[in-house]
Amino acid sequence: MPGAARGHSIDTIPTPALVLDATKVRQNIARMAAYTKAFAIANRPHTKTHKSVAIAGLQLAAGAVGLTVAKVGEAEILARAFADREPDILVAYPAVDPARTVRLAALARTATIRVAVDSPEAIAALSAAAREAGTTIGILVDLDVGSGRTGVPTVERLVGLAAAVDRSPGLRLDGIFYYPGHVTVLPDVQAAPLGLVAEKLAEAISRFDAQGLCREIVSGGSTPTAYQSHLVRGGTEIRPGTCVYNDLNIVRGGFGSLDDCAASVVCTVVSDAVNDQVILDGGSKTLTMDRCGPAPDSGHGLVVEYAEAFIGKLTEEHAQVDVSRCPARPRVGERVTVIPNHICPVVNLHDNAWWWEADGSLQVLPIDARGKLS
Amino acid sequence: MPGAARGHSIDTIPTPALVLDATKVRQNIARMAAYTKAFAIANRPHTKTHKSVAIAGLQLAAGAVGLTVAKVGEAEILARAFADREPDILVAYPAVDPARTVRLAALARTATIRVAVDSPEAIAALSAAAREAGTTIGILVDLDVGSGRTGVPTVERLVGLAAAVDRSPGLRLDGIFYYPGHVTVLPDVQAAPLGLVAEKLAEAISRFDAQGLCREIVSGGSTPTAYQSHLVRGGTEIRPGTCVYNDLNIVRGGFGSLDDCAASVVCTVVSDAVNDQVILDGGSKTLTMDRCGPAPDSGHGLVVEYAEAFIGKLTEEHAQVDVSRCPARPRVGERVTVIPNHICPVVNLHDNAWWWEADGSLQVLPIDARGKLS
């Protein structure tokens, strides 16, 4: 882990501060590694959650076959950081514009680059860029399995895209991409929707086999369904992101416990002037306005030390916390720990995190790919 | 304006891109300057919206008496940038912890530093830090006029705080601070709540005068009420932020028009695979999850070129846009312009903006104080 913390302790770091519990991060990485190993599923963690070279390094050391990114800027940072091992990077995002396709084609000189696409336009643009650069880009064709975000809605169209990839110079068909992000109910009652996902995938795989189309990689994932991935036959890899840190979405969705939450934001109480309220120095520019999906009315995060406190309102730099039900109340100047609703965009607001070991030592962990939008 | 754009045009900059219409920014700055001059109100723009040294320079050149910040990190950047003119910076945020008070006391060596406070703890901490540094910090005491965020609720307590400041070495009582952010109804029907603000302020001013407490500065503001500031007797300055760029909160609240919106996010359509929908490459990590206050159900921004399009859902890097009602639909690869709901946190997500002149020229404008959380 890079970066000295220059004599700081957890009680003196400037707030608001993004703190990573090193022990819990290692446990979360080890747990996913053990699960994917047990079921012989490849793990390609989505780095959008941590945006950190150091954390990606821990994931690779634990057996990840490669890394997932959303944006080309993220791929560039990881490709450079792991250049010594020819990294295998999946861009889980349709690249259709020259600002992305040209850069990806260039990256393919030193890294294995794969891109998920769902349009003929993306295939044409990536093929042109790869030919121009003299490189090869691997392609996964994106099937919508119900989330309704990207991906073609029918297996028929998926096969059409795959055939187009097969005909396109500069491209190599690697398989199928899907995103089961809509499957977020509790494990014991989610058989039906995950079953529908599996059914649609099975149909796609069978059509691919019949037409001799490559499906070496069948890539799914998202943290809520990650530990049910063995139930989806034919899937070869998953791309879980959030589970490296976890957050209230995971806890309140029933997919993890508060003890699994490795990332928190340490805040200072800066005001108690208004009755029954304290103000923390972390607002929407620190915690984001993301609501908790499974519990939209549960406020803007959990104050660990004051279970009865309710973060009812955020403005840019203020959290307004209702403390009327707290038996003891936090005082001005006191520090408290907030577990965010959704950790991924929170990390993206911080230039650095504090890597906090069980012995109390701290190191500065840069969020290397923060703010890489294109 | 600093930074060359290396041969880019508005049609080739990588997306998502934060674009500033230079003509509109200048108009917005000039309009506020003319208003405050006409009514002899001092203008101390809140830089939280732009976080840019260059834009702050334009505001000072237009007659601003000083600058407002939320965080000490922002104050440090501005104090350094304008060191040649001994800048007058108001930290509109209660500093109570050593990480802030010590830095502010040090800054007071080269800049006029004023801080708004609402607790005895903040007064004690700032006094100790200023004495230690051998500097003087100006203090405004914060009166809650109804927004219920910070500020003491009664004039009695305000006078108590002011007297405590007067007794504290290292501190100089400068006056009264208030935030009328809750007054957001339309101009023609807001006389009552703004009247209540004015009434409470008048009471405070009269008590200050009776006790010989300094109220040289009586600082209010926030963009929605900015152009009604002359109705608040006794106010000496305002701290408008958003009006430098404007956004859908301002437009839909009835405080400006779309033509006044100087900042937008240029996005690319990256997918149209799902029926009646296109995906833009700007999600919550680009546009934030902030809803439009006056119209919470109006989606996540306005697509300028397609008035009937509706940005119904954001995930981290995807905007899902319902285009079912669009007579013509945007195609994959096409660029569109999005006006955000709330521009301030959007700017904070971008490392740079593009400064776009009427002649089509572009320059890179760094968001110098982006991510300064403490």
Image (spheres, coloured by chain):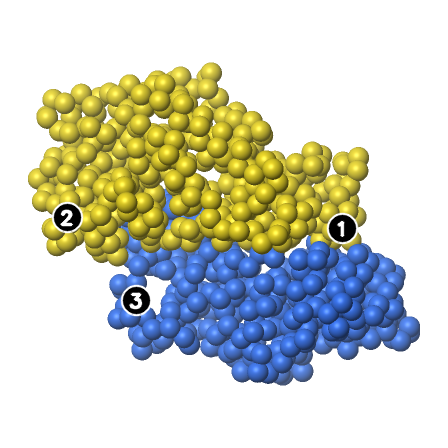
Chain colours: A blue, B yellow
Q: Is residue A64 above or below residue A198?
A: below
Q: Quadrant of residue B310?
A: top right
Measured from the top left, where is residue B350 in percent x and y?
51, 51
Q: Secondary structure at mark 3?
A: loop
Quadrant where the C terminus of chain A is found in the figure: bottom right
Q: Is residue B281 visible?
A: yes
Mark 1 vs mark 2: tell me if same chain: yes
Residue type at tag 3 = Ile
- Look at the numbered disc 2 and give the secondary structure of its residue: loop
Residue drawn at x 76%, y 36% is B325
The numbered disc on residue B256 is none
Instruction: Identify residue type, mark 1.
Output: Val
Which mark lies nearer to you, 1 or 3? Answer: 1
Q: Is residue A290 visible?
A: no
Label 2 sits on what residue type? Thr
Q: Are marks 1 and 2 in contact (CB under 8 Å)?
A: no
How far apart are labels 1 and 3 at the CA level?
Answer: 48 Å
Give the quarter of the image for residue B87: top left
Q: Which residue is mark 3?
A: A10
Q: For this rendering, which residue is in front, B12 or B317?
A: B12
Choose mark 1 or mark 2, whichever is in front. 2
- Residue at x 91%, y 72% (from the top left corner): A211
Q: Earlier in the sequence, mark 1 or mark 2?
A: 2
Residue on which the image places disc 2: B135
Q: Position of residue B317 (x, y in %)?
A: 61, 55
Q: What residue is pinned by disc 1? A: B332
Q: B220 or A134: nearer the eye?
A: A134
Residues beneath discs 3 and 2 located on the same chain: no
* Chain ID of residue with mark 2: B
Say few, some or many: other residues with alpha carbon within 10 Å of mark 1 (under 14 / 14 to 19 / 20 or more): many
Few, some or many residues within 10 Å of mark 2 (<14, 14–19, 20+): many
- Badge 3: chain ID: A
